Amino acid sequence: MDQVTEPGSVRRRGPTLDRATTRVAIIDSARALYLEHGVRNTTMEMVAQHAGIVRQSLYDMVPGREELVRLAIMGRCTEIIEHKVRPALTESRSFSDGVVEVCALTIEFVRHDPELTNLFDATGKYKIAELLAGPHPAMQELVASVFQDDFARARRNGELRTDTDDDRINEWIRGVVLMILLRTDLRPDTEREMLRTFLVPALLHPRQWQREYEARNQHLEA
């Protein structure tokens, strides 16, 4: 006889789980199997078995493999931001330095992460670009969470431009990060220099940009 489940729960092999817990189990299972077998050799049936649910429940929550790979990428990107990028930053940094370091560290960690390399190889550059720089709410929220405190502080200090909003600035940052991420011919110091020379001035209030431009020229002349 089929197991009867409560509203909001998921049919599984064993005790029922709520949908949020099951979603986490599905993504964790997919990530583990992708690392062990590769994306192309991992079937949805394998993911369902690993997560301890019936296959129909898997499809009720995730429509197909492409969406599951996207969720796996988002899961790993979130871990990189929370556990690698954030701890590397200091409260004493300037706004400009913070933007450069967040972007540079994100590029470095994402580019050299074995799990993401495996996922990206099976996804294709167009799909990667669509996920990292496209209109995906989860990625938009992740990037916004990184910069929101810095943006608020920079606005109070008159450092950030005032003719646009945080969402549009975050969108521009994601596009620049993607552009550099997809290149393989740049050294880390060159990437940081590009970010400081071209990205940072686009974010600053004109008066702040002038101050930093003059300070930088004085440093170079010294």
Image (cartoon, rainbow, N blue to C red):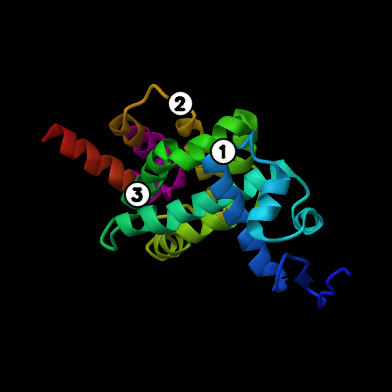
Q: Earlier in the sequence, mark 1 or mark 2?
A: 1
- Please report the residue visible at 62 percent of the width from the left and 61 percent of the height from the top: 25
Tell me residue 12's x, y (percent): 74, 65
* Residue 206 vs residue 135, the one in the foreground: 135
The region drawn magenta spans: 193-209
Instruction: Characterize the local packing of mark 2: few (<14), some (14-19) or many (20 or more) Cα atoms within 10 angstroms.
Output: few
Q: Amino acid at mark 1?
A: His
Which residue lies under the disc numbered 1?
Answer: 37
**Residue 170, can we see it?**
yes
Total marks placed: 3
Q: Nearer the viewer, mark 2 or mark 3?
A: 2
Kind of element beneath mark 1: helix
Kind of element beneath mark 3: helix
* Location of residue 87 (image quadrant): bottom left
Q: Earlier in the sequence, mark 3 or mark 1?
A: 1
Instruction: Characterize the local packing of mark 3: few (<14), some (14-19) or many (20 or more) Cα atoms within 10 angstroms.
Output: many
Which residue lies under the disc numbered 3?
Answer: 96
- Please report the residue visible at 38 percent of the width from the left and 39 percent of the height from the top: 108
Which residue lies under the disc numbered 2?
Answer: 183
